[in-house]
Image (cartoon, helix red, strand yellow):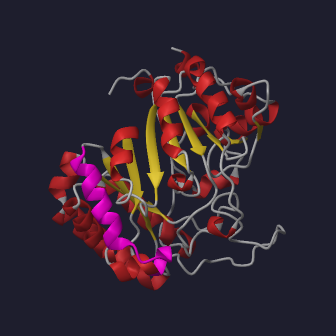
Amino acid sequence: MLPLLNLVSDKLRALPLVVLYITDGCNSRCVTCDIWKLPRRNMSMELVDQLAAEFPALGVKQVILSGGEAMQHPRWQEIAAKFRAVGTKVMLLTNGLFLKKQAQQVIDFVDALTVSLDGGTAQTYQAIRGVDAFDVILEGVSLIAAGGVPITTRTTVQRRNFRELPLIIDAAKAAGVGKISFLAVDTSNHEAFGPRFNDGSSIPLISVPDYALTADDLPAFAAILERLERDYAADFASGRMAESPQKLRRLYDYFAAPFEQATFVPPRCNAPHISTVIEVDGTIRPCFFLPASGKLGAEGLKAGINAAEAVDLRRAYRSGERSECARCVCPLYRGPRSLLGIS
């Protein structure tokens, strides 16, 4: 019952989900993210041990190993094993570059896998991710799918790849992927993805990223979404497509709203009330897109997530005071039935 109390208070009694940046290094060179340009640090095993010891009391059901690129941490398998040993399921969020080489380790240490797949062809993938890895990623996905690990592909939809959405679906299905998900590329957040908008000051260097869809792209994008609903009806019905056609149409609204050709309604989200993000040095965020609210200290994780600044941030987003939430591309919402473990 403790997770339900989170929904009626800005103080957290339980923490069902933790997103853990175990490294801030990355071996992709994405055009939409500058994290790979930052100095690389790995989370210490001392911090991992502290978190593993605290997770049971907080009711942590799932931890997402992320980064940077989580598989660049030289001891990521050991980290996964420590969390599984205390009853926490482990999901690995990865760019997939090491999947083929470490397929058996993923099968042995991970409960679920999410792989970024930002192109339907090798050329488009390389143009977006900065590395020539499309085929090797799909080969790794196929190996791990054959090993029984549930796999989701996550595509960040942007100008360079929106025309390839059908090709992306076909490639994912051929590799044995169980779920296929699409999110819009973020075009406005200054907290996530590294210092991609400014030079350290508060003044943005760019106002409309060149990876956002233009007004001229919108008719073609609308036609592609209609094609997906028609040609992949069985995949929507089976749940293989993670978002419904209605939710995918929100992608159109997101890109069309700046041109006043649609209205983007802020998503329903309670991520800061059911989860937290912990960075490689113990910095705590209420979610990926909101600013840091403190740092994990000797007093422990429960105290960290309930520090005054963290509580204030949860109150502010819930009351509509955080501008970041108005254009959020990655909503996370869990209702009471979900928090009780009822499907």
Asked if one can make out residue 280 in the rendered structure from this viewpoint, the answer is: yes
The picture places residue 84, in percent across and down from the top left corner, at: 46, 29
Front residue of 196/222: it is 196
The vertical placement of 280 against 217, above or below, is: above
Q: Is residue 159 left or right of residue 319?
A: left
- Magenta-tinted stretch: 127-147
In the orientation shown, which residue stands out farthest toward the bottom?
216
For the image shown, how many numbered marks are present on the structure? 0
Q: Residue at x 78, y 30 (%)?
A: 307
Q: For the C terminus, which image quadrant? A: top left
Q: Is residue 136 magenta?
A: yes
The picture places residue 22, in percent across and down from the top left corner, at: 60, 47
Front residue of 177/187: it is 177
The picture places residue 338, in percent across and down from the top left corner, at: 41, 28
Q: Quadrant of residue 118?
A: bottom left
The picture places residue 290, in percent across and down from the top left corner, at: 68, 49
Q: Is residue 105 magenta?
A: no
Front residue of 173/96: it is 96
Q: Residue at x 62, y 67 (%)?
A: 36
